[in-house]
Image (spheres, rainbow, N blue to C red):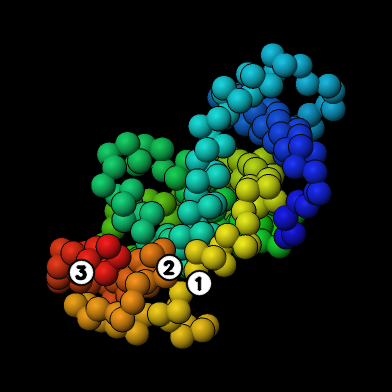
Amino acid sequence: MRAFNSGDPQTWSIAAKQFLLQQLRWVDHGLDLVAKRARRREGDTKVGLVRSRPMTPEEAMYLLKERLRFLEEVVVHVMDYLYFYNADDEVFVSSLWHSWALVPNVQPKIDEYVLRTLLALSSTWTDDDPTSAFADASARLDSCLAGILHNGAHGLVEQARRALNDGEAKGAESSRSNLRTRFQLSFPLVRWTRRFLVSSELHAGLAHDEQRVAGDPAYPFDPWDFPDGDVGSPTGFLLDRFRRMVRAYENDDLEADSLWQLLVLI
């Protein structure tokens, strides 16, 4: 997707704000209907359209207050996935879910964390269709979670995979159907982040490093080897170490390796 371009920074800023508020109105309206449907367990499963009308300053403030935390989560996860993890599904999902396994309050809200992961993965989708974006992101997430489980028991990941795949034929109130609805409502925020906040030039600058062979993300030195000269891309170097750790599925010298990484970067 091409970034939004404008020769006038003020026009660009106004367009970004207007688009964001319209998307937040849609998200707020839709998620409110989803919550009501979950409580009532009745009625049409389709989410009604928000009528187009001028937005008052009071409504804008309400939307920003009520949905700011959710917007922040979407933006942070998308930018983290694209900038730091360089859109590497396996490393991103493994890092997220291994860290979340240490947080006690994740399990009761497992669907929220599955949704966050899906939205981040969908940021590489190339069109605005939320249905196909959900199908693609959920298949990729399921593959990554299965890979984690293949290398050892992991209760939280098992629960996440059940939430992702539960109820393919059980009707509208299944976990997967609920995730799909909330994803479709939230997907425009992912597109907004890509359009207005993500810079391909900044991404290229963060990834550039003469210590690596062009086109090869791996650094040609092992722990306790030190390069001639500075590492040009700290994010690229750390991502390379994450990749090696995730794909080896073990690291007996984690503390020593972390110390070496620090010494390389300072």
Q: Position of residue 199 (x, y in %)?
A: 63, 57
Identify residue for label 3. Answer: 260
How many other residues sit within 10 Å of disc 1, few (<14), some (14-19) or many (≥20)?
some
Relative to 157, residue 237 above or below:
below
Q: Position of residue 166 (x, y in %)?
A: 50, 51
Please say if the residues under marks 2 and 1 sit with CB atoms less than 8 Å apart.
yes
Q: Quadrant of the N terminus?
A: bottom right
The amino acid at mark 3 is: Trp
Relative to 77, residue 73 above or below:
above
Q: Name the residue: 79% across, 32% down.
A: 49
Q: Give residue 104's quadrant in the image.
A: top left
The amino acid at mark 2 is: Ser
**Labelled disc at residue 208:** 1
Q: Earlier in the sequence, mark 2 or mark 1?
A: 1
The amino acid at mark 1 is: His
Marks 3 and 1, how far apart in space?
Answer: 21 Å
Toward the viewer: 234 or 179? 234
Identify residue for label 2. Answer: 233
Q: Secondary structure at mark 1?
A: loop
